[in-house]
Amino acid sequence: MKNEIVLWLVGIPSSGKTTIAHYLKAQFSLLHYYCVILDGDDIRCSVNRDLGFSPEDRSENIRRAAAIAKIISSAGVLTICSFISPLREMRQIARSIIGDKLFIEIHVNCALAVCINRDVKGLYQKAIAGEIDNLTGYNADFETPLYPFLVVNTDAETVEESGNKILQALSHIIQNRPVSPKDF
């Protein structure tokens, strides 16, 4: 296949985007798909280290990430993007860069209280203490996707359940055949 799909995992911090991305990559490897993860933290520490968290910088962060995903996808590599992508407009920019047929938006939904409890980076605690302004989902907007390809509810599903739900939904795209639980 000349162009592979780009899975765009969106959700508030600590909702499980990165964890699901790594689970999916492992499962795709078992199916002999070469796969790359573009994670928001990694991109911000490298290519986008010059960007802050203003609305303009957040938009530019997503634009650059989408451009990178498009290049990787054009090389025939299945790409999993794990970015908060807080605003619908940002996600639309990513979709327009990657292309409608390749961009697959998956909402990694999780209750704020669960995300606060999971918070390994301490971001929510800093926001609660007033040390961080504009933490998406807490004191900055996260616009829920209107028409995602799929929603996984990580506060009610295990990583495996969410990941397998995604794989099952993608089965017609990735294999052109139904995927059964024994495949995973």
Image: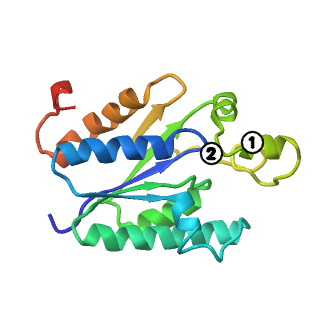
Q: Tell me where residue 161 sits by quadrant.
A: top left
- What kind of residue is marked 1? Tyr
Mark 1 touching mark 2, by CB under 8 A? yes
- Categorize mark 2 by other alpha carbons within 10 Å: few (<14), some (14-19), many (20+): many
Q: Where is residue 40 shown, x and y percent of the image?
A: 54, 59
Q: Which residue is mark 2?
A: 13
Q: Which quadrant holds the C terminus?
A: top left
Q: Residue at x 36, y 35 (%)?
A: 163
Q: Is residue 124 left or right of residue 1?
A: right
Q: Which residue is mark 1?
A: 124
Q: Tell me where residue 179 sits by quadrant.
A: top left
The span from disc 1 to disc 2 (Cα, nearest Å) is: 9 Å
Q: Secondary structure at mark 1?
A: helix
Q: Which quadrant holds the N terminus?
A: bottom left
**Residue at the extreme top:** 156
- Categorize mark 1 by other alpha carbons within 10 Å: few (<14), some (14-19), many (20+): many
Q: How many marks?
A: 2
Q: Secondary structure at mark 2?
A: loop
In the displayed structure, would residue 73 be above or below residue 168? below
Q: Is residue 147 visible?
A: no
Q: Where is residue 90 shown, x and y percent of the image?
A: 56, 62
Q: Where is residue 67 shown, x and y percent of the image?
A: 43, 73
Q: Residue at x 71, y 49 (%)?
A: 141
Q: Is residue 21 visible?
A: yes
**Residue at the extreme right:** 130
- What kind of residue is marked 2? Pro
Upstream in the sequence, badge 1 or badge 2?
2
